[in-house]
Amino acid sequence: MKVSIIGTGYVGLVAAAVFADYGNDVVCADIDAAKIEGLRRGEIPIYEPGLSDLVLHNVDAGRLRFTTSNAEAAAHGDVIFLAVGTPTRAADGAADLTYLLQAAVAVAKGLTRPAVIVDKSTVPVGTAERITRLMAEHTQQPFIVVSNPEFLKEGAAVDDFMRPDRVIIGTTDARARELMRRLYQPFCRTSDRMIFMDARSAELTKYACNAYLAARISFINDIANLADAVGADVELVRQGMGSDPRIGNKFLFPGVGYGGSCFPKDTRALIDTAREHGLSLGIVTSAERINEAQKLVLVRKVRRHFGEAGIGGKTLTLWGLAFKPNTDDVREAPALRIVQTLLADGCKLRLHDPVAGPNFMAQLGETHGAVTLHDDPYDAAAGAHALLLVTEWREFRSPDFERLKAIMAAPALFDGRNQWDRGHVNSLGFSYAGIGR
Ligand SMILES: NC(=O)c1ccc[n+]([C@@H]2O[C@H](COP(=O)([O-])OP(=O)(O)OC[C@H]3O[C@@H](n4cnc5c(N)ncnc54)[C@H](O)[C@@H]3O)[C@@H](O)[C@H]2O)c1
């Protein structure tokens, strides 16, 4: 099938590479000319396991190409995906649809024959209808707008796209349903995981999923803080809870709060949609409030550790800057709030992340030498008065604690992801603080 993708980010590039890998003829467009030039040279703009090989292989095979022209992409596809960003609008927390509406107009103007337009971006209920009305002002060609929200997880995006838990297809148009079924059939060979519904329900399903997962994380963080207060170990509580099949053990890990490009903005956008309809979403609103406080749980623990002496002038090391492991995405990463707060406290910071360091420093901006980035985790820890584990990359699970002890200025560990064994590190002479333990 001829497939076009508008937007070459974490979702668009993965979708394009995977659709091409399944034999489709794919054109991928972006308004970011530097990104497209880089891709044409074989440079992959994001870190995502398996993605680079997939892109290069399918470009070589002639099934995947890149353009800065949305019109060219519009003329190519039988199916045209809109996969541009829908960030938070600063004024009210709603989803900012500027990029999406621009892309829709550009596609409408470029249509040369009937097409199915697929909204893959996460958008408020009613957006498919809004795009339909807008595009109709700019084209005479017949088209249908389908909602097809994406559920891939950064860090496992290629695998998720190839083996989706479900494919939500929001349209009541029979021909569009048939086309979408044909496109996704190769991804659902073992069992039919396509769920058809109307566009509004599809749009709401995406937000409901993210809000629910965010609420689970905030729930267990709330329980973790209570465990700290009452002297229980949330890791045991978590296991006890998760063994109940009605609850399950996924997304029940206490930590420094959720970040990333989806949960924070999608919970805010859902709250805004409810507000527009005169409703308040109590659980989602609380999840967001708890999460904002949770991002600074390690900072509170570090301040308490140093007590009256204060933390001004201390050298602290952070391991992990990405919002989660296996990605270089630092959007709304808890590490940003932690670093900004510790800087305001007068600390010197030594940072390490396996891949997200450069993105993080660019996001952080000028720090007048108070922050240094290190390629090696032990370099980063040298001379530190405390080490904070913020992102649970696998390589941080079993570090050489004896080496750490020898190079740090003081043996204090703050484990924001409950990765380390308190008994073991205590026996080596470290003080240890986890979350809810
Ligand atoms: N990142 C995820 O894990 C994820 C998962 C599921 C859903 N989503 C949703 O998918 C959408 C895209 O997210 P993302 O993380 O891939 O965003 P991204 O910021 O990584 O990429 C968006 C791309 O769109 C391009 N763009 C903007 N306006 C354009 C236009 N008019 N024409 C062509 N290109 C344009 C940008 O230059 C950018 O490269 C969002 O709505 C997001 O909520 C993201």
Image: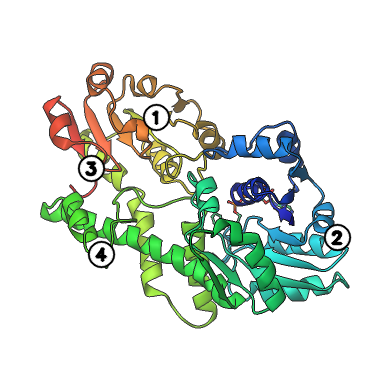
Q: In the rendering, at what x and y percent does residue 58 appear? A: 69, 40
Q: CA distance from mark 1 to mark 4?
A: 43 Å
Q: Is residue 276 rendered to the left or right of residue 248?
A: right
Q: In the rendering, at what x and y percent does residue 123 appear? A: 60, 66
Q: Amino acid at mark 4?
A: Pro
Q: Quadrant of the N terminus?
A: bottom right
Q: Residue at x 65, y 39 (%)?
A: 55
Of tags 2 and 3, the one toward the viewer is: 2
Q: Is residue 15 rendered to the left or right of residue 2?
A: left
Which structural element holds mark 2? helix
Q: In the rendering, at what x and y percent does residue 281 appear? A: 42, 75
**Crowdedness of circle 3 by 10 Å Cα count: few (<14), some, many (20+)?**
many
What residue did someone put label 2 on?
110
Which structural element holds mark 1? strand
Q: CA distance from mark 4 to mark 2?
A: 50 Å
Q: CA distance from mark 1 to mark 3?
A: 20 Å
**Crowdedness of circle 4 by 10 Å Cα count: few (<14), some, many (20+)?**
few
What residue did someone put label 4 on?
245
Q: Residue at x 72, y 54 (%)?
A: 6
**Crowdedness of circle 1 by 10 Å Cα count: few (<14), some, many (20+)?**
many
Of tags 1 and 4, the one toward the viewer is: 4
Q: Amino acid at mark 1?
A: Leu
What residue did someone put label 1 on?
349
Mark closer to the chain start, 3 or 4? 4
Mark closer to the chain start, 4 or 2? 2
